[in-house]
Amino acid sequence: MVYPRWVTVSKMDDSQIILTIFVIFTAVTTILSVYARDKHIFILNKLKIQFTIGGILIFVGKGHRAFNPKPLNKGFSYGLMSSVFIGALLFYTMLLPKIIKFISDFISYVLGTTTSTPTPVVVPIPLLFKSSGILPYPLPYLLVSIVIAVILHELAHAIVALKEGVSIKSWGVGLVLLIPIAFVELNDSELDMVQTKSKLNIISAGVFANALASAILIITAITASYIVTQIYGAPIQVASIAGVDCSICNTSLCPAKVSGIEPNMVIESVNNTRIESLEHLLATLRNTSLGSNMSIRICNYSGVCRDITLRLTAHRKDLPSTPCIDVVFTTVTAFMRDSRIYIAKWFEELMLLMDSMITINFSLFVLNAIPLFITDGSLFLKYLLRESKNMNKFIALNIIDAINALVIILAIVVSSYILFNLR
């Protein structure tokens, strides 16, 4: 195809493609949700789907009858319900102020009153996959954490519903804001027949499950860390070689490969000066002159060390005055024993997985507790204030839900824009 001279055609990168998909998906599913009015749609008389604000739900599982209901006692009910109030409180006191400040900082940046780019606060998980350095967890850990957290959440809903005498019609999976979710569909007629307390118990069960999982995971992580430190000593953060990239320097000789530097090695010292951190290492390299010799002591993860000497004749392509050795550095957790550095990779991976699971469970706990159209917090508020005629009309308009959704979606869009255009 021939374009006019004034037309500029540029190819989108992966991040821009995903961002475009996110915007289109959110807009289309929201429009279809308004058009369908939350009704179920059958495809080929078999597959049942439902569009919701910013997402789609797919019903795939069969139901289960509540044969022998045993309603929860008052103490457990209070525990379940309090988790919703605590989660909402955390959102409005911790996350919401950060979002508002972030949007305010972005407006100031656009108006030119400040030159500092605001830090993104709410970005869809699929977009984070394409942004190196932003997502702190490996993709497998993140997916495992999401699956476990979602299963716990929906399983809690199902168990409490059956105990309160409400049958399960079906269950399914879905995508909301391109984030994978799972859900349980209850028998509406049975749900309408049970007391308000039972309704609130069922609705708050998922939030409670994620809150409890977060607490258990935090305690487990602290306990595991304490046991490991008693065996290996206090952990320290050391500079490690993440990889060798021969395109960093201005030479094709690749100084790192010539010197025998390999990934998964720890930088113990430079010019007989012990390296305390990654920042210390980078500062040392910046202060080293081109053309000088540099002695580096590197150790493998078992604590076996060797010394190498580099002649710093190469420089970074983007920084002509900075010496370059074609190495990508990172920070790893290590232990010091008998004046030797040991890397317990399994411990770092375990802590990373635990941290990922804590983050996902805590996020589900807080975000599900607030009124946001299809969240547990929205239903909880609906049933809690249903008896009040004045509040009932207010809730029917979904005003609180709309405000929360607007703030979060605005933060997501602005964060995504900053992430892929200003950084």
Image: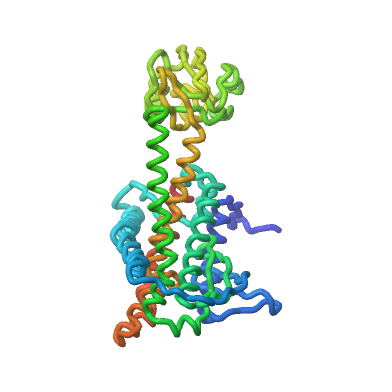
Q: Quadrant of the N terminus?
A: bottom right
Q: Residue furthest bottom?
A: 389
Residue 113 lies, in percent from the top left, at: 29, 52
Residue placed most toward the observer, 132 or 311: 132
Q: Position of residue 133 (x, y in %)?
A: 47, 42
Q: Nearer the viewer, residue 315 or 51?
A: 51
The percent coordinates of residue 108 (x first, y second) are 31, 55
Asked whether, in this view, residue 160 is left or right of residue 110, the answer is: right
**Vertical arrangement, residue 111 with respect to residue 317, above or below:** below
Residue nearest the viewer, comparing 267 with 4: 267
Colour scheme in the image? rainbow
Answer left or right for 90 relative to 252: left
Residue located at (39% from left, 32% from top): 229
Residue depicted at 41% across the width and 26% down the height: 282
Residue 193: percent from the left, percent from the top? 45, 85
In the picture shown, does residue 4 fall above or below 171?
Answer: above
Figure quadrant of residue 259? top right
Q: Is residue 280 above or below residue 84?
A: above
Q: Is residue 309 visible?
A: yes
Left or right? Give the position of 98 relative to 37.
Answer: left
Q: Quadrant of residue 351?
A: top left
Report the number of numbered marks: 0
Using the rendered image of the protein, determine whether residue 111 is visible from the camera's viewpoint: no
154 or 73: which is nearer to us? 73
